[in-house]
Structure formats: structure tokens, C-alpha cells
Image (spheres, rainbow, N blue to C red):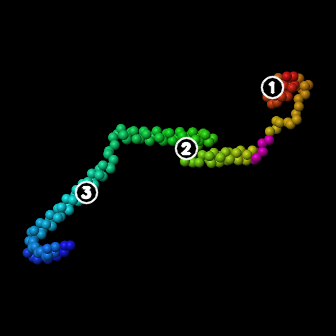
Amino acid sequence: MENNQNTTTQEGATVTVEGAGGQTEKTFTEAEVNARIQSETDRVRTKYANRVKELEDEVKKLTPAQKSEAEIDFENRLASLEARERKLNFLENLKAKGVSDELSDYIREDADLDKLSATLTKIVNDTVTERVRQTGYKPTDHKSGETVTAEAFAKMSLDEKERLFAENPEIYRSLVGR
């Protein structure tokens, strides 16, 4: 193994190298030392400049090129068509679940439509039931067990017979004799 010892004087540098054959001393002038340092510095600078150039070329390869106007238009059109297709699929899913497509602007596309449909149905049914309960509407036109005799049928006007046919076709047919 080599053992280097450097000694510097004002006139130059003395380098002692210990090798297999013994110790050898060599003296360099300051100009020679500066030339060797400059040479080594240039070699390192060249090596790293080449490496930087290689990396810059690689970055250029990986950087996307400027797109033409036609490519940009195509990508925008494609994105628009994909958005329309997603919207149409969403509307079809809404209809399949029994949800009005008028609500599509208020529902996210990733919403659980089964749960939404069940919830909307429950809300509508509860609202209708509550409204009927609050208003207490009970039809007054219905008279249970009301029968029309043949004599009363014979005395009815044509309008009354039509109303009877519309309200209770079975009684009308039995009185007409069919």
C-alpha cells in the first residue's frame, strides 16, 4: 500500500511516496503543482458538466412537448363528451331507482341511489299521511249500503242514471236487467 507524504516549501512541493521498492522523493515547482491542480480541476469540471448535460437531456425527454391547438381542442372535446356520458348514466340510474331526474342538479353522482330512493319515498309517504291526518278529509258523497230500487231508477233522469253508472256500475246493470 502506498503512503504519501507531502511537504510544501516556498519554491515548490516535495512529495515522498513509499512503494514496494522503498521511498521515493520528488520535488515539483509551484507552477507544476498549479498545473496539476488545474488539470485535475478541469477533469472534474468536465466530468460533472457532462453529467449535468445528460440529466438536462433526460429532463427534456420527460417533459411533455407543447401541444398543438388541435390536440388541446381534441382533449377538451373528449373531456366534455366524457362528462356528458357520466351525466346521462347518472340520469338513467336515477330513473331506474325511481328518483326524478329533476333532482340531478342537487345530488352528487357518487350518492347511494338505493338509500336516497328509499328516503325520498318515506318522506313523501310520511308527508302525505300527515297532511291527510291534519286535514281530516273524509268523503261525504259515500253512503254505505245505499240501494236504488227499480221504482227509484225508473224515476231518475238521464243525468242521474249516468252518475249512477259512473259511481256504481254493478247496481246500474242489475237495474237495467243485463
Q: Secondary structure at mark 2?
A: helix
Report the front residue among 66 and 149: 66
Q: Secondary structure at mark 3?
A: helix
Q: Secondary structure at mark 1?
A: helix
Measure how far apart labels 2 and 1 are at the Cα level: 48 Å
Residue 125, compared with residue 27, is above or below; it is above
The image quadrant that residue 49 belongs to is bottom left
Percent position (x, y) of residue 152? 90, 26
Percent position (x, y) of residue 159? 81, 25
Which tag, 1 or 3, sits closer to the chain's start? 3
Magenta residues span 133-138
The image quadrant that residue 91 belongs to is top right
Q: Residue at x 85, y 22 (%)?
A: 178
Give the amino acid type for the residue marked by disc 1 in the picture: Glu
Name the residue carrying label 1: 162
Name the residue carrying label 3: 52
Measure how far apart labels 1 and 3 are at the Cα level: 100 Å
Mark 3 vs mark 2, foreground winner is 3
